């Protein structure tokens, strides 16, 4: 194994990924037959893990009615790319279900190698049974001591909910202070009832790690996203997707939210005790904010970061990253979407890794997770390792 793949005195194993040029795209047509319960005039969408499918935003590709109870729409996807997706009527409250109203596994498809491709789908039922009424509530899966800060207001960004998870024994010792990790996409961290594609089980995983002595007791601040997610989580605009308002989001975190958390809880306020964690665009913005504000955030979890954003802006920024940062960086070998095949996505993450090393960041852990996709399930599966690296027990 070459020395360039050894970081923080940890030897990592890697899948072999052949170098490849950016894949050609194939037009993929989704043909969806919907149930009789579908409201007249409904708008149907395909949402999935690829960028062109909205990266699980609940919408993605908008379909048009083409016949009675049939919708169709097309999108260009990278040839031979595996995708995961579901059909919705625009949100996860109206996602497709099985005929009994039960949960469905993500649908999967491998895009054709060339030519045109057609995916035919039959939706059995909708989560709200097509009525348009509020769907039945999901059962909350929060565990432990969780404090809710609903609709936290800001002068920089849209108001959003914040959940604070406190470690076991927090109230038992009124003198102890704790490190803090801030998590983006906070509604996906603790509770299946608020997640759109499954939770990370942060509360269970953190409690387990603390109990067995692998993770230092810490406070988790879970910051929900809003419809402005793409703008909030991107430091520069992308030629195709826009965005670029992460500076305002950083000011919200640093000037408004963190001071409020530090006043309310027994936190350790120094940068070495404060981390920022996110996946996808959340991974991008985590490393970007820490690079710009190492005096605030000294620990970073860049999970499957969208290193392609803004003509690979993150690779350039990482070249001047502060040496003081402690960084977890990872990527799944089966991540991919239209315009970027899995090899190109892995390559971009490797380039971020190498740029961090060149900048002198030595407290760095890099993983290529064999077979892992770009979704909540994959990120939850490696959360324990992330916590152990970012906050190892003394």
Image (spheres, helix red, strand yellow):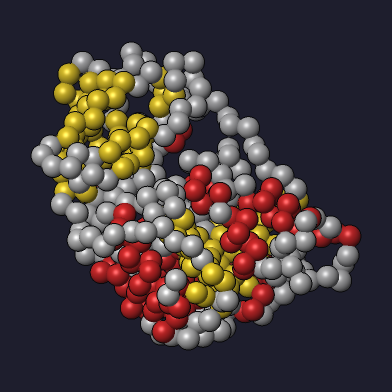
Q: Residue furthest front?
A: 1
Location of residue 312 (image quadrant) = bottom left
Place of residue 266 in the rendered image (x, y in percent of width and height, measured from the top left):
77, 69
Which quadrant: the N terminus? bottom left
Please name whichever residue, 152 or 274, is drawn nearer the observer in this view of the structure.
Answer: 274
Q: How many marks?
A: 0
In the displayed structure image, the side of residue 254 where residue 340 appears, left or right: left
Place of residue 376 in the rendered image (x, y in percent of width and height, measured from the top left):
49, 47
Q: Residue at x 69, y 48 (%)?
A: 204
Place of residue 129 in the rendered image (x, y in percent of width and height, measured from the top left):
44, 19
Q: Residue furthest left?
A: 115
The reply to whether residue 263 is visible in this rendering is no
In the displayed structure image, the side of residue 373 where residue 111 appears, left or right: left
Please name whichever residue, 177 or 114, is drawn nearer the observer in this view of the structure.
Answer: 114
Which quadrant: the C terminus? bottom right
Q: Residue at x 26, y 56 (%)?
A: 340
Q: Is residue 62 above or below residue 133?
A: below
The reply to whether residue 287 is visible in this rendering is yes
Please name whichever residue, 54 or 89, is drawn nearer the observer in this view of the structure.
Answer: 54
Q: Is residue 74 above or below residue 271?
A: above
Q: Residue furthest top?
A: 36
Q: Residue at x 62, y 67 (%)?
A: 389
Q: Residue at x 44, y 20 (%)?
A: 98
Location of residue 383 (image quadrant) = bottom right
In the displayed structure image, the side of residue 205 where residue 116 appears, left or right: left
């Amino acid at each position: 194994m070459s020395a360039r793949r050894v970081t923080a005195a940890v030897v990592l194993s890697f899948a072999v990924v052949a170098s490849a040029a950016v894949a050609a795209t194939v037009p993929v047509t989704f043909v969806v037959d919907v149930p009789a319960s579908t409201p007249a005039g409904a708008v149907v969408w395909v949402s999935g893990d690829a960028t062109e499918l909205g990266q699980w935003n609940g919408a993605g590709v908008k379909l048009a009615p083409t016949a009675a109870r049939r919708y169709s729409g097309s999108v260009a996807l990278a040839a031979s790319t595996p995708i995961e997706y579901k059909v919705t009527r625009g949100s996860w409250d109206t996602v497709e279900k099985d005929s009994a109203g039960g949960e469905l596994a993500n649908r999967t498809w491998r895009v054709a190698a060339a030519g045109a491709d057609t995916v035919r789908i039959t939706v059995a039922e909708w989560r709200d049974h097509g009525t348009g009424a509020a769907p039945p509530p999901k059962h909350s899966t929060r565990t432990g001591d969780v404090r809710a800060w609903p609709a936290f207001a800001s002068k920089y960004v849209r108001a959003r909910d914040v959940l604070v998870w406190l470690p076991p024994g927090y109230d038992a010792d009124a003198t102890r202070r704790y490190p803090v990790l801030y998590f983006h996409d906070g509604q996906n961290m603790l509770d299946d009832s608020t997640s759109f594609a499954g939770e990370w089980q942060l509360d269970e995983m953190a409690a387990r790690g603390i109990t067995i002595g692998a993770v230092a007791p810490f406070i988790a601040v879970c910051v929900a996203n809003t419809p402005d997610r793409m703008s909030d989580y991107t430091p520069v605009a992308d030629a195709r997707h826009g965005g670029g308002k992460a500076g305002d989001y950083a000011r919200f975190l640093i000037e408004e939210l963190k001071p409020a958390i530090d006043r309310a809880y027994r936190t350790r306020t120094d940068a070495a005790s404060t981390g920022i964690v996110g996946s996808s665009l959340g991974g991008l913005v985590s490393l970007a904010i820490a690079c710009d504000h190492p005096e605030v955030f000294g620990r970073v979890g860049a999970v499957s970061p969208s290193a392609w954003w803004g003509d690979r802006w993150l690779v350039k920024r990482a070249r001047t990253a502060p040496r003081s940062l402690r960084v977890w960086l990872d990527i799944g070998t089966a991540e991919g979407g239209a315009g970027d095949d899995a090899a190109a996505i892995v390559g971009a993450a490797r380039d971020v890794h190498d740029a961090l090393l060149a900048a002198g960041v030595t407290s760095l852990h890099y993983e290529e997770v064999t077979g892992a996709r770009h979704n909540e399930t994959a990120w939850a599966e490696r959360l324990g390792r992330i916590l152990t690296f970012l906050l190892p027990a003394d």
